Structures are given as structure tokens and as C-alpha cells.
Amino acid sequence: RVIELGSGCGIVGVAAAICGCKEVIMTDLAYALPLMRENVDINRVAWKDTDVVVSCKECDWFQPPPVDELLGHYDSKADVLLVADCVWLSSLIAPLLRTLKLYTTESTDVFITYQQRGKEAHDLFMEGIHKLFDVVDIDTLKEADLAKPDVFHLLHCKSKVS
């Protein structure tokens, strides 16, 4: 099960479904859902498996719904959380971090990618994410032979074990 936070038009969630994820829940504010749903419908033919379930749901980081409400089952957890390009406004960092913590268990893999746009938001995010998670800054050149500018970040996070 994959939950994407801040899905926008849905490109990352659609890519996850195309790559073979069995259940993808894309989330954002209500205004983003119509375009997200349109892109899911357009790309549904690309799913490798016809049993893939992709849904688009509202999630406001200031008042996030319980994870079982997003997943539609009790005793449910996300295997993977995806966050793409959501670190840009300082005022959204604390709500994003709280939502990540709420939706993460010890076994959840969290992948975050973003372009650093300002020092304040970046510093707040890095301080907060390192308090909550064990963080690995993925070396894309070493791992995938993919060069990137220093302002692009790709992080793999796991909950800190108490």
C-alpha cells in the first residue's frame, strides 16, 4: 500500500501504479482532486495489473484523516509513503511532518524528493525530519547513475526505533 501526500496532478501516484504498486492512495486538498482523478482515468490503461487500485482522497495536513480512513480498512498501514516537491513553504513544514509521523509505522518506507527553494523551509524540514526519522540522503549518481543539482533532494526515511 502506497500513500502519496501532496499529489497535485497525480504524476507520482500514477507512476507508482504503472510500476506495479497494487494499491495507491493519492492525497491532496479538495481543489486538486478533479485533475488528479482525470489523470488516473486517462492512465488506467497503463497499469500492468488490472487489479491495481488507485484512489484520490482529500488530506489536509492541518487536520489529516486517520490512516484507516484513507486506506479504507481497520488495522491498516501504509507500506510506503511518497512525498514529491512538497517542501517549499515554511508554514507547511510542521503540518507535513506531523502527517508523516501519523501515517508511519516502524516498517513504513518514506521517500521524499524536493527541490530546495529557500533556506528557511529547507532548514526547518531537515531539522524536523531528522528528529522523527532515520534519514538517508540517496546518492542518485551512485545508485542510479543519475546526476542531479545539489538543490534536489531524495531522502529515504524510516521511523526511529525507540
Image (cartoon, rainbow, N blue to C red):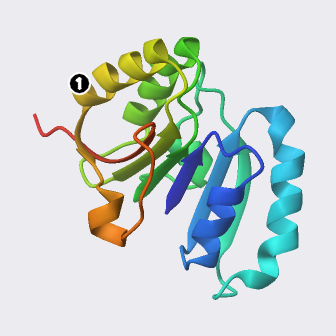
Query: Which residue is drawn at the image coordinates 40% and 23% (left, top)?
Result: 125
Picture coordinates of residue 50 (x, y %)?
A: 70, 87
Q: Residue furthest left?
A: 162
Given the image, on which type of amino acid does mark 1 rest? Lys
Disc 1 target residue: 131
Dot 1: element? helix
Q: Quadrant of the C terminus?
A: top left
Q: How many marks?
A: 1
Query: Which residue is drawn at the image coordinates 63% and 39% (left, top)?
Result: 6
Query: Which residue is drawn at the image coordinates 56% and 45% (left, top)?
Result: 84
Residue 76 at least partly seen = no
Q: Establish if 159 lies above or below 46.
A: above
Task: Tell whether 119 sits left or right of 11.
Answer: left
Snapshot quadrant of residue 104:
top left
Residue 104 at least partly seen = yes
Snapshot quadrant of residue 31:
top right
